[in-house]
Amino acid sequence: VQLQASGGGLVQAGGSLRLSCAVSGRTSDRYVMGWFRQAPGKEREFVATINLSGGRTAYADSVKDRFTIYRDNAKNTVYLQMNSMKAEDTAVYYCAQDRDRKMTITINSYDYDYWGQGTQVTVSS
């Protein structure tokens, strides 16, 4: 399984970006997906997660009502729509797959088994 994250870049505060995470593999290999981020000098932190059907999601308090996670299972791709961005959103964003869960979700990074390479998001104030 390979996860390819893309869509990062430089955006002004208040702007928007959409990250994508393309998952290679069989259609039967669809599981819970999550987004995490790591800012310089800080630990990796949870951002958002979504179950297989898309009917269950969870967000970090810091991004709630600004970010939206969704998925297109036909394309094996998970997205993170980021709106009203702030300077503190600056980080490397990683997508990840939890191979043990399909319908329940988890915010713990140690539950995720496969990780993408990360995409840099920089928000200028």
Image (spheres, grey):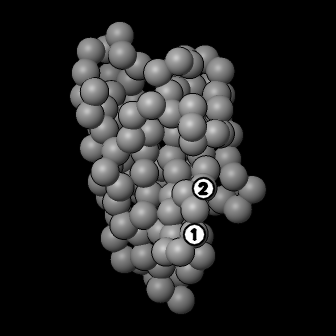
Q: Position of residue 83 (x, y in %)?
A: 55, 64
Q: Amino acid at mark 1?
A: Lys
Which residue is more in the foreground, 76 or 108? 108
Q: Quadrant of the N terminus?
A: top left
Q: Is residue 16 left or right of residue 63?
A: left
Q: Residue at x 31, y 51 (%)?
A: 117
Residue reaching furthest to the bottom: 125
Q: Is residue 21 above or below residue 29?
A: below
Q: Residue at x 31, y 38 (%)?
A: 3
> In the rendered image, which quarter is residue 66 located in?
bottom right
Q: Amino acid at mark 2?
A: Glu
Q: Position of residue 121 (x, y in %)?
A: 41, 69
Residue underneath mark 2: 45
Under circle 2, the secondary element is strand
Under circle 1, the secondary element is loop
Q: Residue at x 26, y 15 (%)?
A: 26
> In the rendered image, which quarter is residue 86 located in?
bottom right
Separation of marks 2 and 1 at Cα, in angstroms: 9 Å
Q: Position of residue 94 (x, y in %)?
A: 42, 51
> In the rendered image, which quarter is residue 51 located in?
top right
Q: Position of residue 81 (x, y in %)?
A: 49, 53
Residue 7's tag is none
Q: Can the viewer see residue 71?
A: no
C-beta proximity under 8 Å, tags 2 and 1:
yes
The mark lying in front, picked from 2 and 1, is: 1
Q: Can the viewer see residue 7?
A: yes
Residue 42's tag is 1
